[in-house]
Amino acid sequence: MTTTVIEDATGVNTNVDVVIMAAGKGTRMKSRLPKVLHRLAGRPLLAHVLDTARALQARQAVVITGHGAAEVEADCAANALALAPLELKFVRQEPQLGTGHAVQQALPVLADDAIVLVLSGDVPLTQPATLFHLIKACGGSQLALLTLEMAQPDGYGRIVRSGNAAEGAVQAIVEHKDASPEQRQITEIYSGIMAAPAALLKRWLARLDNHNAQGEYYLTDVVKFAVADGVAVCAHKIDDALQVAGVNSPVQLAELERAYQLRQAQRLMEEGVRLADPARLDVRGDLLCAHDVSIDVNCVFMGKVNLGEGVSIGANCVIANAVIEADAVIHPFTHIDGGELGVTVGRGALVGPFARLRAGATLGAEVHIGNFVEVKNSTLAAGAKANHLAYLGDASVGERVNYGAGSITANYDGANKHRTVIEADVHVGSNCVLVAPVTLGAGGTIGGGSTITKSTPAGALSVARGKQVSIANWSRPAKVPKAPKE
Ligand code: UD1
Ligand code: MG
């Protein structure tokens, strides 16, 4: 999780309470999954918003749930630890009578001294720095709105200013459905994000009604109450539409995903990473790269991945939770998933094509793992090689070991897992079965096709298979001719 530390946070944002509206149905997603749990860059939309609240060093985040409330709350709660010290609270809004009604539900858990920042659970890409400006603009005494110029403002709430001048004081937000033809010409729209002093917000929300085109309690009506009360309303206008873009449909979700990924690609390239095609990269987590990293097309990175200097990643690799050390080469179609244990690929190692490294695979320097080789919870010391069609599970492999094609560690007896130890410089022939627990002594050789059930001495040739016999002049059975029909 990336955290943006806000430089001059002192004093200004110690009392920020974030309210996240997440009760809506998301009908257009046409999905059983609540909308805010759909994933962007591998994480629920709502998790992105909660991360933002944490980055703002907010005091608490109050999530308003309704549709799929139990599922949404359970998902957030599962990640609560990662959000600390942000305090997470839930309030339910049932039924959903509009955005104003939604925020009303949160009022009992908001202290009067708070600056309330209202966000939506389906708007995942707002930058903490943008919100910090909004919080500063609110300053505990004003109403601050995040706004945007839009060439196609249909559907959005319009910012109505006095004298219709772009610099005129904000008078109201008028929803599209309630707007007059003249108001619909206004291109400055309300983003859905505002910051307000809690005490004032409480007063204004008590005055809401639903006498409008949609019969809803509009949060946006607080603007006219602020104006009536003589409270200054300021609009903080940004020009980056992506920051306030919401997700209402699979199309919008895919658009946001691509925009987000393109930004990640740009950031990586600015750091010196060479991408074969910035449009064909997916980073669903944190990807850290040293200098001179190159990444071919269609690679997916998940969880925490660290690529050392000079690392090269071939096309179509999926890499999760792994550390790839300097100058290692990951050939195309390699799948690496470190899970909770992680995977380490040593300096100058060669992996793939078509290799699979699972949790706990730890490869030393210059290790070679070739096609259709699977490694799980095993350590391979420097220079060890398993180049073709092999399985190493729960094994400790010494330096310079050569592990033959088709060989496997039989690490599971049906009930328990056992370890295989292959000491330095052992040569395991092709098609061997190493029945764990077993230790192959240093420098030993295992004859191809052996099933090894007992540990082998150092330096010895060990063979465990049927002896080859040849029977001279062997005549193969011949077909008996069928008797002709009578
Ligand atoms: C809202 C604004 C509009 C703004 C637009 C920006 C209002 C009245 N209008 O309109 O000015 O331009 O956002 O996208 O606020 N939600 C609840 N409970 C409800 C209703 C909504 O939790 O009863 C949640 C939704 O799930 C969503 C968010 O609030 O996450 C915004 O609701 P939505 O219906 O999308 O608002 P708009 O009508 O688009
Ligand atoms: Mg609506």
Image (spheres, rainbow, N blue to C red):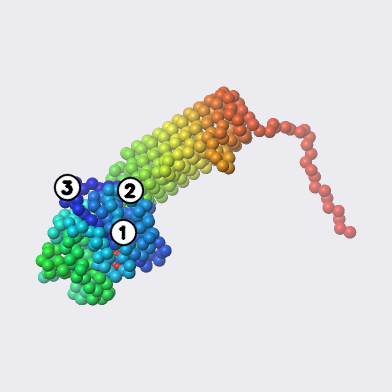
Measuring 41% from the left and 35% from the top, which residue is drawn there? 346
Residue 459: x and y, percent?
A: 57, 23
Nearest the camera: 257 or 64? Answer: 64
Residue receiving disc 3 = 10
Residues at circles 1 and 3 in contact by the CB criterion of under 8 Å:
no
Residue 262: x and y, percent?
A: 32, 52
**Label 2, residues with CA under 10 Å away: few <14, some 14-19, many ≥20:** few
**Residue 236 shows in this picture:** no
Nearest the camera: 399 or 329? Answer: 399
Measuring 48% from the left and 36% from the top, which residue is drawn there? 378
Residue at disc 2, CB closer than 8 Å to ligand 1: no
- Is tag 2's residue or tag 3's residue first in the polypeptide sequence? 3
- Is tag 2's residue or tag 1's residue first in the polypeptide sequence? 2
Q: CA gap, disc 2 to disc 1?
A: 17 Å
**Which picture quadrant has residue 140?**
bottom left
Secondary element under disc 1, as helix, strand or loop, is: strand
Measuring 23% from the left and 67% from the top, which residue is drawn there? 219
Residue receiving disc 2 = 82
**Residue 419 shows in this picture:** yes
Residue lying at the far front in this picture: please name it.
Answer: 108
Which amino acid type is marked by label 3? Answer: Thr
Which amino acid type is marked by label 2? Answer: Ala
**Which picture quadrant has residue 106?**
bottom left
- Is tag 1's residue or tag 3's residue first in the polypeptide sequence? 3
Q: Which mark is residue 90?
A: 1
